[in-house]
Amino acid sequence: MGSIAIIGLEPDAEGMPDIRAVARLRQARTVVVPSATGASAEMLSSLGMTPVSFADIGLAQSASTADVVEALLRLARDGDVALVAGGYPLVRGGLISAVLSRAKDGVDVFPVVSPLQVLVLALDIDMTADLELVDAEALGSADLQRDTHLIVTGVENAIQAHAAADLLRRFYAEDHSVVVASVLASGGYELTGMTLGELATLAAVPRRSALYLPPSRIEPPGGFAGLVRTIAALRAPDGCPWDQEQTHASLSPHMVEEAYEAVAAIETGDPAQIADELGDVLLQVVLHAQIGADEGTFTIDDVIAGITAKIRRRHPHVFGTAVAETAADVTRTWDAVKREEKPSGGVVADVPTAFPALVRAQKISRRAAAAGFEWEDLGGVWDKVHEEIDELKATEPGSPDAEEELGDLLFTVVNVARHMGIDSETALRRTCDKFSRRFATMEHHAAEGGRELGELTPGEWDELWGRAKQTERADRDG
């Protein structure tokens, strides 16, 4: 792989280019100019060089920076490449920083300028943002702010570079990126990207080198857009390795887990905890949307547009001419619109099989009832419950028939909950919590009496259970 140089041919007062820039051009196997008829091509011809133009390598004169970088990398496979700018070599925005991020051996910049000028212009540092300039000798006493652009000047050798790296690692992560700007013996500057850890092990560093460290965190712009930009930064090439590896499939368990944790927070009634857990759920949504954006399949805007359209479509009584005076009317309208949206599927066929069994049973039950498959009243459901209990009792315990009848009974009890306006998943979860609390109290009372649970008689179990209920009641009333 050959080297890549970006060279300016701005003439001096006598109309001549910098002699060191010309010497660097003569080293290159391929010299590239934007136009075969421009001033740069004419000057190179006068120096006895034959450049290739953008057109010669398949680029338009107005080619994007990304396309130019790809072309330079392709040419560098066969030897050294020099791209000629008509004037100062940093005029094309983002060019040097883009090459630096892709070229394994860095990029050379000609003619000679100061390291500060090279770094500020080549890396597109926003001069309206905070920029901290520190001499290497004073680095140990500097009050560094990790959210600013930092340039360390006056690095004279590898020992000083290692010392700077050790100091900087107190403030930045080991893999924080660094750009080293080193003076070339032939003139110009070589820019090399690395991490702080790699800086600490460099074998050699030329005199008068400078270091650039970008901010260690992105300033939060605030609001939902800020969250989206933050997640995009995590997924970017220089972002978080864990976030970069995630896929829709790998994140699926986290989505389920965060949803359950949000429900648990809601049950506590603690607003701060609810807000915190809802943030975790929102993180999952935005992360999935960023994965979609990276793959070119969908973006967060598509997600928002889709749900907004769906909500408006399913609330014709608010955004249309339909009438719905009760919550039951709204539910019927919602279900009717959903059936119109998915006419090819059955009423219950698209209820996800991955749902917890109780949640799935509730959804199937509600959809079937909305389609007309329903008992006349709650009494009819109770009759069905007793019928299912009798059928379960008639089976052989542990048999396949018993399993089937137990499932029928549980499904029917879910219908009882629906008729009573109770969420069966929530009801059972709260009962599990209540049982766990009471059992823990029983364990405590048994331990106070010096007893192991396995030693208790049925009567003692009943007594401890009663005491646990009384303790819970007292705690609740107190």
Image (cartoon, rainbow, N blue to C red):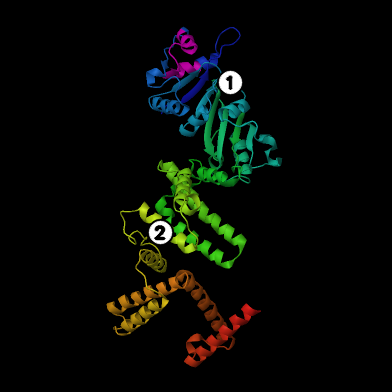
Let me know if residue 174 appears in the view: no
Q: In the picture provided, is 136 more to the left or to the right than 64?
A: right
Callout 1: 10 Å neighbours few (<14), some, many (20+)? Answer: some
Residue 425 picture quarter: bottom left
Looking at numbered disc 1 in the image, what kind of residue is underneath it? Val
Identify residue for label 1: 112
Identify residue for label 2: 335
Name the image quarter holding the N terminus.
top left
Residue at 55 percent across and 59 percent down: it is 277
Name the image quarter holding the C terminus.
bottom right
Q: Is 386 situated above or below 415?
A: below
Q: Position of residue 5 (x, y in %)?
A: 49, 23
In the structure shown, which secondary structural element does the residue marked by tag 2 occupy?
Answer: helix
Q: Position of residue 125 (x, y in %)?
A: 60, 32
Q: CA distance from mark 1 to mark 2?
A: 72 Å
Looking at numbered disc 2 in the image, what kind of residue is underneath it? Asp
